Image (cartoon, rainbow, N blue to C red):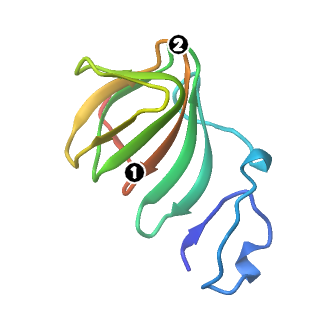
């Protein structure tokens, strides 16, 4: 099995077909290469490229120009997420982007989002 939740000990010994309950509050926040942006990886399958993560952005934090290699889905839990198409997705709302979509994203007031990436983003800057 290639899917795991990083930072949880002992999952290698679980049978491949049992459920994995993830104690999200116990997972650490990891910095990203982008100032003010951190994430908790809930699920990662490096072989397939799949990542499901909680993403926390400080007010004004930015993600530079990037392209989605496959469908990207984001549910905004707190705050808002804006992009260079003029969208501002606020708490309780959902945005998805098709494969090949390119954009810059930022958080005007800070945000907490659930992101589901079928393949990793390709950063172009």
Establish if 36 lies above or below 74: above
Q: Residue at x 79, y 73 (%)?
A: 10
Mark 2 or mark 1: which comes first in sequence? 2
Mark 2 is surrounded, within 10 Å at the Cα level, by few (under 14), some (14 to 19) or many (20 or more) other residues, namely some
Q: Which residue is mark 2?
A: 109
Q: Residue at x 57, y 59 (%)?
A: 43
Q: The C terminus appears in which quarter of the rendering? A: top left
- On screen, residue 97 versus residue 59, left or right, reads left
Residue 57 x %, y %:
56, 25
- Where residue 17 sits, quadrant-wise, is bottom right
In this view, which residue lies farthest toward the left? 100
- On screen, residue 18 versus residue 53, left or right, reads right
Q: The N terminus appears in which quarter of the rendering? A: bottom right
Establish if 46 lies above or below 65: below
Q: Which residue is mark 1?
A: 120
SS type, badge 2: loop
Residue 97 x %, y %:
27, 42
Residue 53 x %, y %:
55, 47
Distance from disc 2 to disc 1, alpha carbons, whole Å, reads 25 Å
Establish if 120 lies above or below 66: below
- On screen, residue 22 versus residue 38, left or right, reads right
- On screen, residue 39 versus residue 108, left or right, reads right
Residue 99 x %, y %:
22, 49
In this view, which residue lies farthest toward the front? 92
Q: Pick whichever, 116 or 6, lies toward us.
A: 116
SS type, badge 1: loop
Q: Residue at x 26, y 19 (%)?
A: 84
């Amino acid at each position: 099995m290639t899917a795991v939740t990083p930072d949880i000990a002992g999952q290698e010994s679980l049978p491949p077909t049992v459920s994995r309950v993830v104690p999200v509050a116990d997972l650490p926040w990891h910095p990203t290469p982008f100032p003010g942006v951190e994430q908790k990886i809930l699920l990662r399958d490096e072989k397939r490229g799949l990542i499901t993560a909680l993403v926390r952005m400080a007010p004004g934090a930015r993600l530079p120009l990037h392209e989605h290699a496959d469908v990207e889905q984001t549910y905004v839990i707190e705050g808002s997420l804006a992009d260079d198409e003029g969208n501002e997705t606020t708490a309780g709302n959902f945005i998805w982007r098709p494969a090949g979509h390119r954009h810059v994203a930022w958080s005007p007031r800070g945000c907490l989002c659930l992101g589901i990436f079928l393949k990793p983003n390709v950063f172009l800057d």
